[in-house]
Image: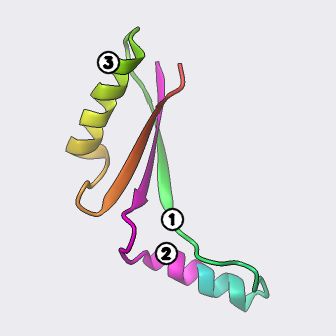
Amino acid sequence: MKVRVSITRKAGLSDPEGVETHRALHDLGYDEVGDVHFGRIITVEVAGKDAAEVQARVEEMCERLLANPVIEDYAVEVLG
């Protein structure tokens, strides 16, 4: 099954890339832009037929390796 993991910084934590990109967009004249936040998307192929089991397995992967649960939030979406 194909699984998409979306990882972002936890709310309230500094996002240096987002701050610099926000500043650069304003410098380029895009004054309508509000906050900018960076994250990443990871696509994982996992063998299995039960979507709930696959999701639980990928969440375990996130806790152990793919994300840093101290400073990042993640969302797991089983695509099929």
- Alpha-carbon span between mark 2 and mark 3: 35 Å
Q: Nearer the viewer, mark 2 or mark 3?
A: 3
- Alpha-carbon span between mark 2 and mark 1: 7 Å
- Tell me the residue that label 2 is attached to: 17
Q: Earlier in the sequence, mark 2 or mark 1?
A: 2
Q: Quick one: 11 or 30, which is closer to the camera?
A: 11
Q: Quick one: 66 or 37, which is closer to the camera?
A: 37
Amino acid type indicated by mark 3: Glu
- Tell me the residue that label 3 is attached to: 53
Q: Residue furthest top?
A: 49
Q: Read off the magenta span.
A: 1-21
- Image marks 2 and 1: residues in contact by CB distance under 8 Å: yes
- Tell me the residue that label 1 is attached to: 38
Amino acid type indicated by mark 1: Phe
Q: Earlier in the sequence, mark 1 or mark 3?
A: 1
Q: Secondary structure at mark 3?
A: helix
